């Protein structure tokens, strides 16, 4: 339509970006729905594309694989936490002692994990071969290792960060979370981290 065109085709580029954003949203919501209905094994590029109302090629070009879909969904779910770490108020954001920031981060990450246990389990399975290169994992590990090194420079912060993140397993979360205590997992992870750190020398 003429009213949608501007000189230099700038309007066309805006429409493409808007279409891409809508498609991305539809694809991630479809992935989310399929996870809820049948877990990670229920998610495939074909099913996601059909449910989202887009072509399979669109899904493949944007996300590459089932692992890419799950990585993108997990990254979306953790975006607010990442922003709060960078620019939010303490103790989650900058300005608090490392130990307080560590426990606040585990509180936030635990809440994400408890609310997305099915996604975590599917993500773990789909990304098993390159789990440590996953964008969300790298971000979490980098933040954890930085805080651990600041609090206990005498310990192997890199390894401890991996050890803490290893318990963020979707199947484990569902196994240890009773209906009457939905925050048991987060509380226990915080206690474990505090015990690992101990008292600064």
Image (cartoon, helix red, strand yellow):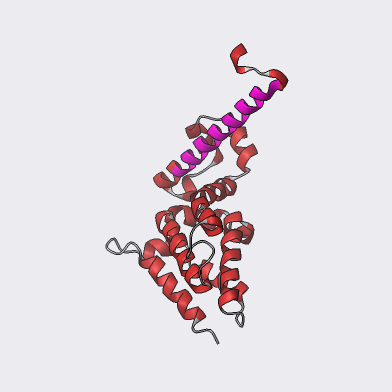
Classify the position of the N terminus by image quarter. top right
* Image location of residue 92, percent across then percent down: 49, 62
Q: Nearer the viewer, residue 59 or 9?
A: 9
Q: From this viewpoint, is residue 168 visible?
A: no
Looking at the image, which residue is at 43% across and 54% down?
116
Q: Residue furthest top?
A: 2
Q: Residue furthest left?
A: 180
* Image location of residue 128, percent across then percent down: 58, 59
Residue 201 lies in what quarter of the image? bottom right
Main SS class of the magenta portion in the image: helix
* Image location of residue 196, percent across then percent down: 50, 79
Looking at the image, which residue is at 44% across and 49% down?
39
* Image location of residue 117, percent across then percent down: 43, 56
Q: Which residues are magenta?
A: 9-32
Residue 191's place in the image compared with 63, above or below, is below
Q: From this viewpoint, is residue 105 visible?
A: yes
Q: Nearer the viewer, residue 59 or 160?
A: 160
Looking at the image, which residue is at 44% across and 56% down?
112
Residue 142 lies in what quarter of the image? bottom right
Q: Residue furthest right?
A: 8
Looking at the image, which residue is at 56% across and 71% down?
147
**How many marks do you count on the picture?**
0
161 relative position to 32: left or right: right
- The stretch drawn in magenta includes residue 16: yes
């Amino acid at each position: 339509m003429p009213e949608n065109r501007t000189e230099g085709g700038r309007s066309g580029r805006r429409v493409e970006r808007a279409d891409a954003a809508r498609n991305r949203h539809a694809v991630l919501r479809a992935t989310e729905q399929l996870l809820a209905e049948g877990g990670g094994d229920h998610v495939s590029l074909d099913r996601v594309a059909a449910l989202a109302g887009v072509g399979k090629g669109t899904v493949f070009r944007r996300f590459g694989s089932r692992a890419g879909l799950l990585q993108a969904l997990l990254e979306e779910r953790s975006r607010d936490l990442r922003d709060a770490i960078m620019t939010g108020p303490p103790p989650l954001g900058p300005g608090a002692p490392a130990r307080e920031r560590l426990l606040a981060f585990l509180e936030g990450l635990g809440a994400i994990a408890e609310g997305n246990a099915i996604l975590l389990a599917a993500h773990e399975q789909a990304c098993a071969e390159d789990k440590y290169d996953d964008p969300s994992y790298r971000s979490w590990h980098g933040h954890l290792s930085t805080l651990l090194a600041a609090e206990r420079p005498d310990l192997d912060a890199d390894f401890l960060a991996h050890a803490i993140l290893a318990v963020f397993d979707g199947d484990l979360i569902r196994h240890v979370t009773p209906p009457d205590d939905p925050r048991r997992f987060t509380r226990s992870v915080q206690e474990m981290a505090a015990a690992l750190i101990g008292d600064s020398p």
